[in-house]
Amino acid sequence: MSAQSMEELVALCKRRGFVYQASEVYGGLQGVYDYGPLGVELKNNLKAAWWRSMVYERDDVEGLDSAILTNAKVLRYSGHEETFADPLVDCRKCKARWRADHLEGETCPGCGSRDLTDPRPFNLMFKTNVGPVEDGASIAYLRPETAQSIFTNFKNVLDSTSAKLPFGIAQIGKAFRNEITPRNFIFRVREFEQMELEFFVEPGTDEAWHDEWVHERLAWWQDQGINGNNLELLRVPEEELAHYSKATVDVMYRFPHGVEELEGIANRTDFDLGAHTKNQRDLDITAAVPANDESNTRLAVQRQDDKRWTVPFVIEPSAGVDRGVLAVLNEAYTVETLPNGSKRTVLSLQPHLAPIKAAVLPLKRNHDGIVARARALKADLMKLGLGRVLFENTGNIGKGYRRHDEVGTPLCITVDFQTLDDETVTVRDRDTMQQERVNTSGLVDVLRERIA
Ligand code: GAP
C-alpha cells in the first residue's frame, strides 16, 4: 500500500519528526526543508545502502567527498553557465513567475490570467562571492550537481589508486538549484542531495554499460522496498536531453502527485572530461566541447599498447536522496483496519532503512530493577552495530507500540517483572503484531535475522 495523498505524508513527516519546513519560525524559506530526528536516520540509512552497494560491494568504484563551493571556470567549461537554465515566464497581472514547461496551456496557475511574457532562459545556479571583494573575479557557484567535481578529480583519483578502466567514482552530497517553482514537498527543492556515480568506460563499450546500469539501478530501488509496479523506465526524447547527454533513461516512480523522475541514468560520453582537459586538440574527443586553454590537466588515460591518450566515456546513474526518501516513505505508508474495526498506521520500511531498529521498553517506568535491565539490554544490542536501538521509558507499552508502528520500528522489546526472574523479554513484530517470549541470550540472533 502507499499513501493516498501527499498531505498524508507531509502530516506524518511533521508529526513524527521526519521533515520540517526550513526557517519555519520566520515563515519558512520556499523550496528548503530540514530533516528531523527520524528523517536524518532514514536519510542516512538510504545513503548508506547506496554507498554499500556502489562502493563496498564492488571493487571497481572509489568514493569521493568534494567541496560544494565551485570555481566558476568549472561550470563555465562544463557548459552550465551557458545552458543550465529553465524557461521562465512572468504573469503581468499577479507578477508570479512560472516555469514555461510546467504550465497547462498559456494560463497563470496563480490568478488564471493569460497575460504572460514570452519564455526566457533563467540560469538555475546559485552564485556567491568568495573572499571580501565582491567582483567578477571572486564569483563562485554552489554546485548544481555533484558530478563536476568527480570529473575535475578524475586524474587525482586515478593517480592515487590502482584504478583501470572500467571504473567509477561515487559521491553523495548537496546540490543547489534556484528552481523557479519548487513544489510537491521534498520532490522539487532548491537545496537537495544527490547520490551520483560516474562510471568511466572505453568508448564503444558505453552503450552496453548504459543498459547494465539501468538494470542495476532498477533492481536497487526495488531492494529499498519499492514495488516494481510503481517504477517505470523512460527514455528521454532527444530534444529534451541535457547538453552533455547522448542518451538518458529516467527511473520514474509513482509519487503521490504523479509519475515523475526518481533517478536519471545518462550516457555523458567524453563531454565532461574533454571539456576540462587542456590541449584537447591533440585528443580524439567525439563530443563537441568548448576549447579549454585554462585547465592545466589532461583528464584522459593512456593506452598500454599504442600509448595513445583516450578520453573515457562516462555512464552516470544520478539519484536524488530527497526523492528517494519521499518514495520509500510513500511505499511504506499503510493504514490497516484491524479485526476490531480500529485503524492502525504502519510504516512498513525495509528494516535496513528503519530509523529505529528496535525499541526497548520497560513495563514500569519507576521500577528501578526493570529500568536498569532495559538500559543494559539497549547497550548490549547497540554493540551489534545494526543502527539505533532506542531505550524509551514512558511506561505505556500500548502507546509505544502504536508510535513505533507509525515510524517503522521493526521490533519492540518489552522488559517486565518476568525478565528479572528468567531473563526473557517480549519481542513484538511491527508487521505481524505477533509477540513472542525470547531469552535475552537469543535476542542477538533475532535482531541479526530480522534487521541486518
Ligand atoms: N548529474 C546529473 C544530474 O544532476 P539531474 O537529472 O538534473 O541530473 C539527478 O538530477 C537527480 O537529482 C534527479 O533524478 C533527482 O532525483 C535529483 N534532483 C534534481 N533536481 C532536484 C530538485 N530540484 N529537487 C530534488 N531533487 C532533485
Image (cartoon, rainbow, N blue to C red):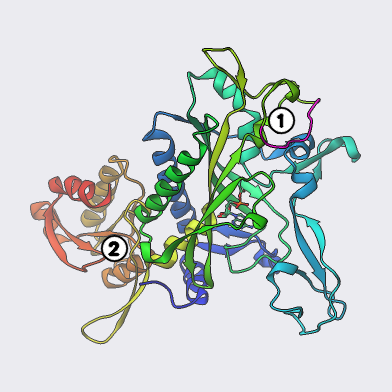
The image's mark for residue 276 is 1
Residue at screen point 76% across, 80% down: 107
**Does residue 127 belong to the magenta stretch?**
no
The label nearer to you, 1 versus 2, is 1
Q: Which of the numbered marks, if any, corresponds to residue 365?
A: 2
Q: Is residue 305 left or right of residue 100?
A: left
Q: Quadrant of the N terminus?
A: bottom left
Q: Residues within 10 Å of mark 2 (few under 14, many from 20)?
A: some
Looking at the image, how many numbered discs can be counted on the residues? 2
Q: Give coordinates of residue 85: x percent, y percent.
A: 75, 55
x 88%, y 35%: residue: 137
Range covered by the magenta-colored residues: 286-293
Amino acid type, label 2 = Arg
Report x, y in % for residue 169.
52, 33
Secondary structure, magenta segment, majority class: loop
Residue 9 picture location, percent across and down: 48, 71
List x then y, in percent, for residue 94.
Answer: 83, 79
Residues 117 and 63: in front is 117
Residue at left offset 37%, top offset 51%: 219
